[in-house]
Image: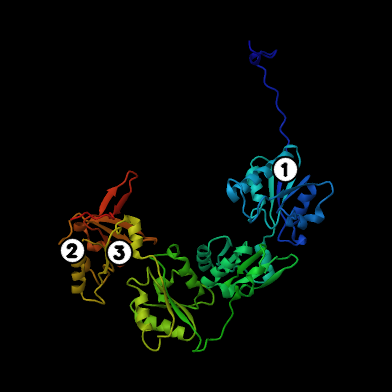
Amino acid sequence: MSVSEQQSPSGAPDQPAAQPPRHTGRLYGVGLGPGDPSLMTVRAVEVIAEADVVAYHSARHGRSIARSIAARHLRPDHIEEALVYPVTTESTDHPGGYRGALDEFYEAAAARLAAHLDAGRTVAVLSEGDPLFYGSYQHMHKRLAHRYPTEVVPGVTSINAAAARLGTPLTEADEVLTVLPGTLSEEELTARLSATDSAVVMKLGRTFPTVRRALERSGRMPEARYVERATMAGERTGALSDVDADSVPYFSVAVVPSRIATATEEPEPAATDAGEVVVVGTGPAGPRWLTPESRGALAAADDLVGYATYLDRVPVRPGQRRHASDNKVESERAEFALDLARRGRRVAVVSGGDPGIFAMATAVLEVASQEPYRAIPVRVLPGVTAANAAAARAGAPLGHDYAVISLSDRLKPWEVIAERLRAAAAADLALALYNPGSRSRTWQVAKARDVLLEHRAPDTPVMLARDIGGPEESLRTVPLTDLDPTQVDMRTILLIGSSQTRRVRRDDGTEAVWTPRRYPER
């Protein structure tokens, strides 16, 4: 009998002696707040008092802001672990580059702390602000928290401190706050600043010129405020536009506060004040289709003008005036918007889809080209078109040359529409047909189908896309010969393939329709 099979006197195999549970220390990530030691939480002070080891990060100069905040709570018998970064912003000859040097440092630092924890010591890692909000502690947490008992003690963030020092609310009601690192590209910063209600940009310092340009390009500079070293010695606040880039340290933030909270009742502008009209495309449905630029223009407007259905897609903002009208008064709506702009108002004309495709841009520019509106600035912001949205749902039926035609004969005679349909069909173009039918127009779809069948095969795929992006979205693909006019209304757009368009059932049960980009040689 082997040793492992030896039996106890009772005849049962011996059980291995129970191992006592391994006793390890406890890891704490301790948030210290924005800089003023009096803003440390009671729990943070308690944890530091209980700790055997106090760890903190610093640059190679050895000075640690985190340690200085907590200094009054450190004891002579505390074991201090200074985790000194090998690099901060400078270059490195590490084979893995800057990221490789930091990863190696974090691994080594985590190993140092793990040695204390394995010895049963309690370790408190100090972190300015909040440990898990752009904090250095998080790199230790990712490497150690799954191995040791861990508690994170939250702290007051620099965002909260900056808002308090400015005395300005960050958000109110349904406003959205966006937190951005200044290390993002200028294009990304501009897009995100344009789209949000309120924003805080962290990590300024060397990034300040880029952040400043992004604020200017997004139109948010007049609102932007600057906070440096909030609650610390050397604190500075003011308008960001007044700040010299050479004087900006890393511990500073840019704040774009609540528009609601900062709004004031202003007198009606004089006729000589400069206003503008921005024609905004909201896409085919809902806020998911809005571009950041369009979202920003809608938020910044004093007045919204548009067809009631499209205005309903735009969130209501306190202090913003909304002027809804019927869908058949485009010229009157454009003139009304331009009159508001003449009085100094910033006006957003809200259009569905893309404003330049069978929508409000043409109407506004037509009126704006006449006196007395020729001096009013007019901008047109693009939106996702109904044709592009429907094509994306179907696959890529507009992947090659295609034509866009409206079947509405309200503004042009049917003879012109039919002539254009024949020309496009004869040229073998895929087609996107807008305004195919309504309660008062029920015959155009059948006429268009018959015209296209003169040039297209009966099995040419036709996509009936209805309310794409909306709650009643539907997409059906039928052969051209089976196109039923009763299944089409004003919320439907028709996509008709060319002779090259393919319709394929995929292995996952979905269907894809696409038009190849390569056209066969004749």
> Of the numbered discs in the image, which one, if any, rests on residue 426?
2
What residue do we see at 77% from left, 60% from top?
A: 37
Side (left or right) of 10 relative to 490: right
- Give residue 465's quadrant in the image: bottom left
Q: Residue furthest front?
A: 93
Whether residue 451 is visible, yes or no, is yes
Q: Crowding at label 3, few (<14), some or many (≥20) Cα neighbours within 10 Å?
A: many
What residue do we see at 75% from left, 58% from top?
A: 40
Q: Secondary structure at mark 3?
A: strand
The three-letter amino acid code for the residue at tag 3 is Ile
The three-letter amino acid code for the residue at tag 2 is Ala
Q: Which residue is mark 3?
A: 493
Determine the CA span between mark 2 and mark 3: 21 Å
> Of the numbered discs in the image, which one, if any, rests on residue 26?
1
Q: Nearer the viewer, mark 1 or mark 2?
A: 2
Label 2 with label 3: CB-CB less than 8 Å: no
Q: Nearer the viewer, mark 2 or mark 3?
A: 2
**Which residue is nearer to you in this view: 244 or 308?**
244
